[in-house]
Each structure stands twice: as C-alpha cells, then as structure tokens.
Amino acid sequence: MGVDVFKPEALKKGDTIAIVAPSGPVRGDSLKRGVHLFEKIGLRVKLGDSVLQQWGYLAGKDRERALDFMRAWEDPEVKGVIAARGGYGAMRILPLLDFESIRKTPKVLMGYSDITALHLALWKEARLVTFHGPVAEVWSPEMEAYSFQCVKDTLMGIWPPGDLPLPESPDDAGSKPRSFSIMEEGSASGRLIGGNLSLIASTIGTPWEVDTRGCILFLEEVGEKPYRIDRMLCQLRLAGKLEDAEGFCIGDFTDCEGDPDSHIPSFSSSDVLQQYFGHTGKPCLANVPAGHGKYNAVLPLGIRVEIEANPDLSNSGRITFLEKAVI
C-alpha cells in the first residue's frame, strides 16, 4: 500500500495529554486510577468536559462528545488524546469530526474496543498512525505492569522497531510465559490495521470501512457468541476484506463462548476462528496479548510489520514492527 503515512510526535515527560470520552460513560474511581498511572509516566493530564457526563449509555450527547474530542485535538498544549473508555458511541461522532483539522496536527490517539471506529476513521481520512491500547479507565492491577511498560515504551518512542514483547508469567504461577499460537503457517508483511471485530464489521459500507489491501489485519472481540463472531467474519469475507489481507493477527476473544447449559448445538469461538483463518494459505498468529483480556499490548496501527507463523520458532511465531511509530 503506497501511501503517505503521518506519525505523531513522541510523548516526553512533562507533556500534557487529554482524556476524553467518545463512547460510553465513565466510572470515576477507575478513571482516577488511570490518571494516576499516566501521571506516574511523567505526563500531565487534562480531563475533557464530557468525561464524567452520562446520556443513556453515552458519555453525553453526540455533539458534546465530538466537540470535546476536537477541543482536545486542537489544544496546542495537548500532545496526545487518550480515550477514557470504550463501550459504544464513537461511530456516532464520526460525521461531526473536523478531519481537515486533525490532518494538520498529528497527535497520539490511544484506545481500544469501541475506539476502533476512530482508528479506522483517522487512518482513512488522515493516514495517521494511532495506537490500539489501554483506555484510561481500564487499568486493573493484573494488567498494570505489562501494559504500563508497553504504553510508556511505545508512546515515548523507546519501542518500536522490534518484536512485539510478550508478557511473562510470574515464577510462582505454575504456567509457561505467554506465546503465540499458529492458525496458519507462513510469513507476510504489510501495514497493521484493525481492532475490534464488531466495529470493523459495522463500518462496512460507510466512508470509513476498513481497507485491508496489502495489510496485516488484527482482530479482537469481547462478549460475542460464536455464531455472532461467525456472522461478522462472514461479512468481512463476503466483502473481500479477508481475501485482500496479507495475513492475520488474532488477539483475545474474551467471554465469547456459548451458554454451556444450552441445548442448541454450537461451535466454540476457537472453532469459528479456525474455520476462517486456517487453511487459507495466509499466515495467522493467534493469542496476541491485546484486547479485552488480562494483558493489553500497545499496537501502533498503520506501521509496517512482518509476521512469522513458524512452529520452529521458540515461541511459535513473531510479530516484528519494522519502523518507529512516532517521530
């Protein structure tokens, strides 16, 4: 994909970030924990006006959330914009954003889940590298060490290039360190794009639908039954999005199994993923530590990567970022 790609400036200690809520309402106690951890990195934090608002299942009305996002983006003091949480609602503000202004002032944008809508839109409209990573609200003690290091190293320009680091299990956990698993062997390279499967499927047919040509497609999901995952993947396949991709990275599919007490036959979510990504001739690495699971790596979207799905490798695979994500 021969495109001009724009990268934000690396954050440094003393820089100001803004936390905004483009989607659902935020819990104040967990937001405070996220603010504290960003301050621990050495960043100053501004909270958007709509962060603690609530309008049904949204953090304020659409125009208020869009205005909050643009106000943060256009603030010369703000060097990065972090989503307060996911939920639902980011798609609703896309028509209200000023993409011309966004193109003129590349900045860090980080979030995941529903924030996938913003990742797709900013890539389509501005060719801006954005970051699939933790939102401010979700900093559980279990994920803190690995995700905290990923946020610090990626946004401050310490990493990438290089291999995506994997979390290590504690010595007394009685389990092996996390490793990739292989759904289809091979190697491929391209720009990493993607995010939450539901959002990617929902934007098909809109001005911001994903373009997978020449790309490595990353997918993650939460709380969807196997037949729904099947339906969304089928939509992507029928739309040509799987065929156009060079390879695949599969993150956590959390709480995505059917009701064990149901008498209706079902596949498991792993069965469904294998049906779509196995035996395609295109490499597919699964068990990527990103999404709604215990760990949430920061994945720079729009950056060139190479994936190797090779059972001879010590960890069964490798995701290598070939360029820096920030300037």
Image (cartoon, rainbow, N blue to C red):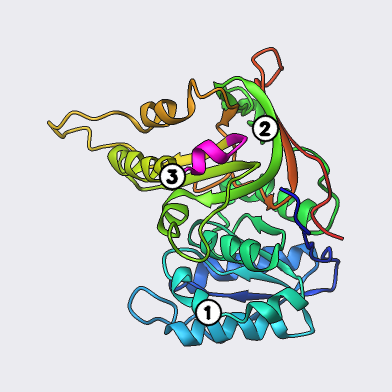
Q: Image point 46% across, 69% down: which residue?
A: 91
Mark 1 or mark 2, whichever is nearer to me: 1
| Numbered tag placed on residue 305 in the rendering | none
Please tell me how many numbered marks the rendered image carries: 3
On residue 168, the disc is 2
- Report the side of 239 relative to 266 (left or right): right
Q: Measuring 73% from the left and 40% from the top, which residue is drawn there?
A: 305
Within 10 Å of disc 3 (Cα), the crowding (few <14, some 14-19, many 20+) is some
**Residue 101 in the image, given as x and y percentages of width and height:** 70, 81
Mark-to-mark CA distance, 1 and 2: 34 Å
Query: Which mark, by number, is residue 51?
Result: 1
Q: Is residue 264 visible?
A: yes
Q: Is the Cβ of the residue at disc 1 closer than 8 Å to that at disc 2?
A: no
Observer-side mark, 1 or 3, equals: 3
Q: Residues within 10 Å of mark 1 (few under 14, many from 20)?
A: many
Image location of residue 194, percent across then percent down: 57, 50
> As drawn, is 244 to the left or to the right of 44?
left
Say what amino acid the circle numbered 1 marks.
Answer: Val
Amino acid residing under circle 3: Leu
Q: Is residue 75 above or below residue 144?
A: below
Q: Amino acid at mark 2?
A: Glu
Distance from Cα at disc 1 to Cα at disc 3: 33 Å
**In terms of sequence position, does the residue under pointer 1 or pointer 3 come before the other?**
1
Q: Which residue is mark 3?
A: 236
Mark found first going from the N terminus, 2 or 3:
2
Q: Residues within 10 Å of mark 2 (few under 14, many from 20)?
A: few
Q: Residue at x 83, y 50 (%)?
A: 324
Query: Bounds of the magenta span?
Result: 239-248
Is 321 magenta? The answer is no
Image quarter for residue 53?
bottom left
